[in-house]
Image (tube, grey):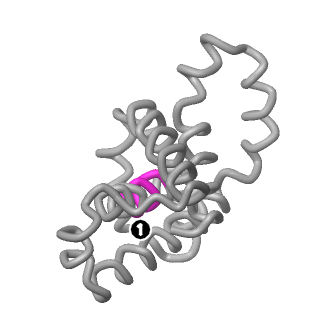
């Protein structure tokens, strides 16, 4: 995944887990309030990017990569799925306007575990950032 996808994953994780984060650091709520007007478009971009990464992984030998670099392959798959899920959650209103009515069922399943997915996105995003910066292929 690129640095853009990792940054999106971290931003989505922050937005999804803001309830948990704000309970410990009230100053974080201010940053979330600044991002709130843009979260719909952030979600749409993340959803599209997640689908693109998922298709690329499937078409370009993700299963082969799983045998060679299993941690990296699983991290990339988790990142793509989190981008899709959280992107759908935050971009639903805009995607409905663009004709994406079928996403409502997905969002209904995701909404109860939004904070959990946010924490997972922060963890996977942080791991992928460390992995990219250090050049780890494990």
In the rendered image of this protein, does residue 67 appear above or below residue 55? above
**Residue placed under numbered mark 1 in the picture:** 101
For image coordinates 36% across by 74% down, the residue present is: 54
The spot of residue 115 in percent (x, y) is 45, 31
Q: Is residue 102 left or right of residue 26?
A: left
Q: Residue 125: horizontal and vertical position, in percent?
A: 51, 48
38, 2: nearer the viewer: 2
Q: Main secondary structure of the magenta part?
A: helix
Which one is in front, 10 or 90?
Answer: 10
Q: Is residue 95 above or below residue 32?
A: below
Identity of the residue drawn at 60% across and 12% down: 23
- Kind of element beneath mark 1: loop
Residue range corresponding to the magenta coloring:
80-86
Q: Quadrant of the C terminus?
A: bottom left
Q: Is residue 59 magenta?
A: no
- In-image side of 8 versus 55 (left or right): right
Q: Which residue is rendered at x = 49% and y = 66% of the image?
A: 47
Q: Which image quadrant for residue 45?
A: bottom right
């Amino acid at each position: 995944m690129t640095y853009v996808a990792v940054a999106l994953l971290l931003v989505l994780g922050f937005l999804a887990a803001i309830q948990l984060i704000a309970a410990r650091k009230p100053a974080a709520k201010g940053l979330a309030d600044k991002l709130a007007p843009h979260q719909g478009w952030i979600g749409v971009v993340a959803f599209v990017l997640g689908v693109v990464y998922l298709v690329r992984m499937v078409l370009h030998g993700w299963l082969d990569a799983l045998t060679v670099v299993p941690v990296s392959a699983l991290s990339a798959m988790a990142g793509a799925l989190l981008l899709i899920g959280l992107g759908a959650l935050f971009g639903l209103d805009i995607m409905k306007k663009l004709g994406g009515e079928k996403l409502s069922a997905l969002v209904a399943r995701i909404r109860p575990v939004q904070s959990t997915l946010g924490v997972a996105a922060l963890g996977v995003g942080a791991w992928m950032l460390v992995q990219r910066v250090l050049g780890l292929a494990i």
